[in-house]
Amino acid sequence: MEKIIDEKQQGNTLVMEPKKGNSRKLFIESYGCQMNFSDSEIVASILAKEGFNTTQKLEEADLVLVNTCSIREKAEQTVRKRLEKYNAVKRNNPKMKVGVLGCMAERLKSKFLEEEKIVDLVVGPDAYKDLPNLINEVEEGRNAVNVILSKEETYGDISPVRLQTNGVSAFVSITRGCDNMCTFCVVPFTRGRERSRDPQSIVEEVNDLAAKGYKEITLLGQNVDSYLWYGGGLKKDFKNATEMQKATATNFAGLLRLVAEAQPKMRIRFSTSNPQDMTLDVIEAMAEYRNICNYIHLPVQSGSDRILKKMNRLHTREEYFELIDNIKRMIPDCGISHDLITGFPTETEEDHQDTISLMEYVKYDFGFMFAYSERPGTMAERKFEDDVPEQIKKRRLQEIVDLQQKHSRYNTEKFLGKTVEVLIEKESKKSDAHWSGRNSQNTVVVFPKENYQIGDFVNVKVKDCTSATLIGDAVGYSDNN
């Protein structure tokens, strides 16, 4: 499961440069994970060639698209509310067309199109290149739908426009789909089987971003450690590859090295990792290259072996500890974050205490913590009763959140008195006299602006902290500028 972006953050916060000659207006919003935001950039790029410029004003849009998430019920409720808002505006602008993209598309296509009649088109995550045809269908008065999942589509040939960019950091998609059938997760059903993108197209995109002044990229996939390029095709079919294909294949560690060497001054991050697929050569590559950030998002979901098995997580508690030990041995200052689900079916107090003890062992820098929410179409929904009472879920979640706060504070205090390199990304939310950026470990750092600018690499001496933020003073530019 990928890191969830706050649902208040929407994909239309910034728009692309208007393309001359384009007369139609596209309003696009994204919810859910980073992959959805990345996909919206691909969609905007495809539609720019069809005469659409993006707009922040819903009322002036000819086409309104919402890129959806099915990971949690709350995300679906948010999207439904937005669709109601779009339709209220549409009553005053009957020419406006409304469409749903992404992970909710397959499951709710008939409900949205035929029963509730709240959208004109429904497009799944592998069908974005078909958007021009689908829009033509809609303009001729027909509903349009394409939710077919592809075995080949990676959008490696599309140069994404950067919608919500600060001009400093960008997402670069490297894989699509997922083969790990975790019982709580809808991703394999909404995004299909795992396939990887040609490494050369990834390096070219990274080089292009560097030429445009970007200073940091995040390599993105549902499960980046599964990256495997052997000339194209599904990951599961690698066993049938030729000996030459196997000998010349590129795995994730190999891709990290290619990107790190292509742009030595550019910071490289990646998300999301899966404990069962992360190999030592990835950690070795991180330790070897200074520009690969010392940060790993490593979802564990539960600390109980019994629950991990029920979730079909293909790692045990001990295997996870072994991986954590290797990371801390090879990269002693590595930041580590997690995803945790509490209240999974049949979870007992003993299982919950196993999660607490795992957190105490790892002492994560931060995490994304959720009470279990049954998702339609998943194995867990079909096979398990959601039998942990809501009040127990809430209590256990609060205990996990409180412990994480304590550990986050423990980790930020380790930086007190130290100097960290920070890439300036934006103005601080709390003070227009301060800059905000992140260090290599992905911790937010704020400091007085002085004469520094967005995009500068600055050394900051840390003098104070909260559980989430380091506070300090700049002591000069880093040698990475």
Image: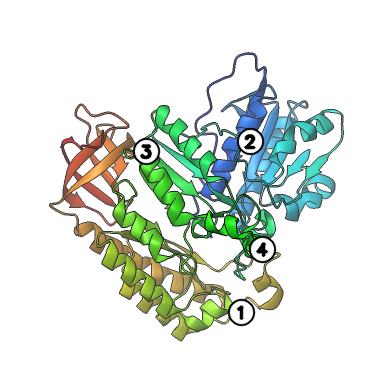
Alpha carbons under labels 2 and 3: distance apart: 27 Å
Q: As shown in the figure, which amino acid type bears the numbered disc 4?
A: Asn
Q: Amino acid type of disc 3? A: Gln
Judging by the rendered image, the residue that carries numbered circle 3 is 263
Mark nearer the N terminus (4 vs 1): 4
Residue 387 circle label: 1
Mark 4 to mark 1 CA distance (whole Å) = 43 Å
Task: Determine which residue is flagged by label 2.
Answer: 43
Is 342 left or right of 155, judged from the image as shown? Answer: left
Residue 8's spot in the image, x, y percent?
A: 50, 45
Residue 2 drawn at (x, y percent): 51, 56
Q: Residues within 10 Å of mark 1 (few under 14, many from 20)?
A: few
Place of residue 59 in the rendered image (x, y in percent of width and height, measured from the top left): 65, 26
| Residue 75: image tag | none
Label 2: how many Cα within 10 Å (few below 14, some 14–19, many 20+) = many
The type of residue carrying mark 1 is Asp
Is residue 402 positioned above or below 147 on the image?
Answer: below
Whether residue 148 can be seen here: yes
The C terminus lies in quadrant: top left
